[in-house]
Image (cartoon, rainbow, N blue to C red):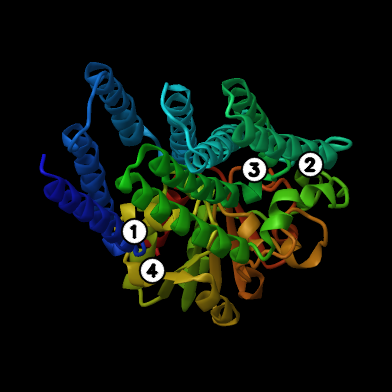
Amino acid sequence: MNSNLYALIGLVVAVCFIMALKGLSAPKSARRGNLIGAFGATVATLSVFFAPGAQHHNTLAIIIAVAFGVIVGVPAARKVQMTQMPQLVALFNGVGGGAAALVSIVEYLSPHEKNTAATIATVFTVVVGSISFSGSVITFLKLQEIMTTRPVVFPGGRFVIAATLIGTLGTAVWVVHSGGNTPLLILGLLSLLFGVLFVLPVGGADVPIVISLLNAFTGLTVAAGGYVLNSTLLIVAGTLVGASGTILTRLMAAAMGRSLFGTLFGAFTAKPQDVAAAGEARPVKSGSPDDVAILLNYAQRVVIVPGFGLAVAQAQHTVRELADLLTAKGIDVAYGIHPVAGRMPGHMNVLLAEANVPYEQLVEMEEVNPTFPQTDVVLVVGANDVVNPAAKTTPGCPIYGMPILDVSQAGNVIFLKRSMRPGFAGIENELLYDAKTTLLFGDAKESLTKVVNSLKAL
């Protein structure tokens, strides 16, 4: 392929990636942005086979690897449920970082002349890529609840982390100075260990922030790998992912009301919390679907607060039917969206878009909070931590300082819950015991269906 044509294709691919990010910035254009990004990635992958001056000695192996990735990736992406999407994102992100690290190691170990700049880029790729891989595995285990979602700390943990980091950096200097192969492999192992220790102290509520941070790490790894392989496309793609991931991480940390350092290492300084008595031992006010329907029927304004439980029950279509029914009765309906509701950024937006909920009805936290005093009924569907007053009243708890939806200011609050089990952060919600709160127990989809039927009969 002519070098000018190859450069032009690279420019087109870069534009596709930029347009993809732009499209993903809004729910209405997210699907189009995703398709543009996929098209750009496909063109970038195919163009590598026709790069001017390239010599491919393992073409068959590369094609087999690509085919294997397609065979595994497409069914996984199509069949995964929305409730498991964050886990899939964590795994895919980790695979990207790990792949970049492996490619750099293989390139470094191959017989060729090594210069200092390339060695530094290789070291950076191995360190950050390995951290991204092992850290993403831990986030997957936490989200899947294979391991505890609570922060994992142990005596002297901060010193172990610091020692591992110092050892990793020292080994990195060793690799750059000596250029040996064995130190590079040791560096990879230390980086994998640091990635595990880096994520273990993070509590469940903060895992989405760490996923975003590790995503930025993967982008930077890919960009550095592009320097090692002399690939402009990898540099562009990695830089875009690294920059966007960094911005998203900062925005999410701000949405949680804490610093990034506090998110990552706050567990080491947090004070132990007293375990609250089991929820069943305290009196709560529960209601029937008929009670909820009557309360909604005579309201003038209703705000629906969706959470992870809505995704688990796959109740997005039913909640849309309920909202449409209330709107037809002349009731003002809105959806209060917390920035980190669910298990990843935009989780609720995607879920509700799947049910064709009008985007105009989705109201962000900053806009909906001032309206709660004028709201007659708040319907909380499967959310807990994002409405928990402990974020304001309980210093030292995992979510303290996080801005929340101030649903307690509404006239009435209805919680749809399966049980009195705490939310993902693992802390009790005192709002459940408030006199204005009514609990409707059961599967969210089944409960909403009964409410809809009762509302139709009124």
Quick check: can you spot residue 149? no
Quick check: can you spot residue 374? yes
In the picture, the disc for residue 326 is 4
Q: Residue at x 27, y 54 (%)?
A: 14
Decide which of tag 3 and tag 4 comes sooner along the chain.
Answer: 4
Q: Quadrant of residue 240?
A: bottom left
230 above or below 58?
Answer: below
Which of labels 3 and 4 is toward the front? 3
Spot occupied by residue 217 in the image (x, y as percentages of width and height)? 52, 46
Which of labels 1 and 3 is toward the front? 1
Residue contact between numbered discs 2 and 3, judged by CB atoms under 8 Å: no
Decide which of tag 4 and tag 1 comes sooner along the chain.
Answer: 1
74 above or below 421?
Answer: above
Q: Residue at x 72, y 39 (%)?
A: 165
Decide which of tag 2 and tag 1 comes sooner along the chain.
Answer: 1
Residue under pointer 2: 162
Distance between mark 1 and mark 3 Cα atoms: 39 Å
Distance between mark 2 and mark 1 Cα atoms: 36 Å
